[in-house]
Image: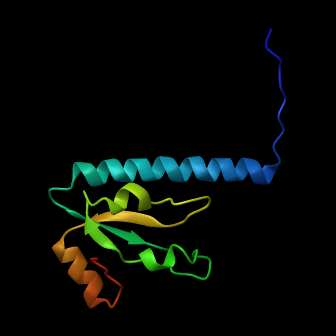
Amino acid sequence: MARQRITRFDQRRLQLIYDTNTRQSFAAGRWARIERTKQRFPYVMYRTMRDERVRASHRPWDGVTLPVDHPFWDTHYPPCGWRCRCTAFGLDEKGIERYRRAGLPVKTE
C-alpha cells in the first residue's frame, strides 16, 4: 500500500518553481526557433542582463557569438542555473556587425 505524503511550499518556493519552469519553456521554444532558422541566422549570441545581478560566472559569456552547431551551446545555452536571466538568440552577419557598430561586445572565440 502506497503512503500518502503531504508537501507544503511557501510562496517563495512556488514562485521559484514557476519562474524556473517558465524560463525553461521559453528557452526550449527559442532553441527550436534557432534550429528552425539556422540557415538564415547561422550564429547564436549569448546575452546577460548586463546589470549588477549578473552572476560572475555568466559575465564573461556576454556577447559570445558562435555557430548554432558549436558544442559551447550544449553546456552554455541559457538559462544556466536557478533564476538565470540570460538569453541567447539567432543572428546573421549583418546582426553581428550592428552589435559591433553599437560598441557592444561580440566574442567569436
| Residue that appears at 19% across and 62% down | 42
Percent across and percent down for residue 2 are 79, 13
Quick check: 46 above or below 97? above
* Residue 68 vs residue 11, the one in the foreground: 68
Can residue 49 be seen at all in this image of the molecule?
no
| Residue that appears at 28% across and 77% down | 109
| Residue that appears at 43% across and 74% down | 61
Colour mapping used in the image: rainbow
How many numbered circles are shown?
0
Q: Furthest residue to the top?
A: 1
> Quadrant of the image for the N terminus?
top right
Q: Quadrant of residue 54?
A: bottom right
Quick check: 39 above or below 106? above
Quick check: 3 above or below 7? above
* Residue 65 vs residue 95, the one in the foreground: 65
Percent across and percent down for residue 40 are 16, 59
Percent across and percent down for residue 21 are 57, 46
| Residue that appears at 19% across and 69% down | 92
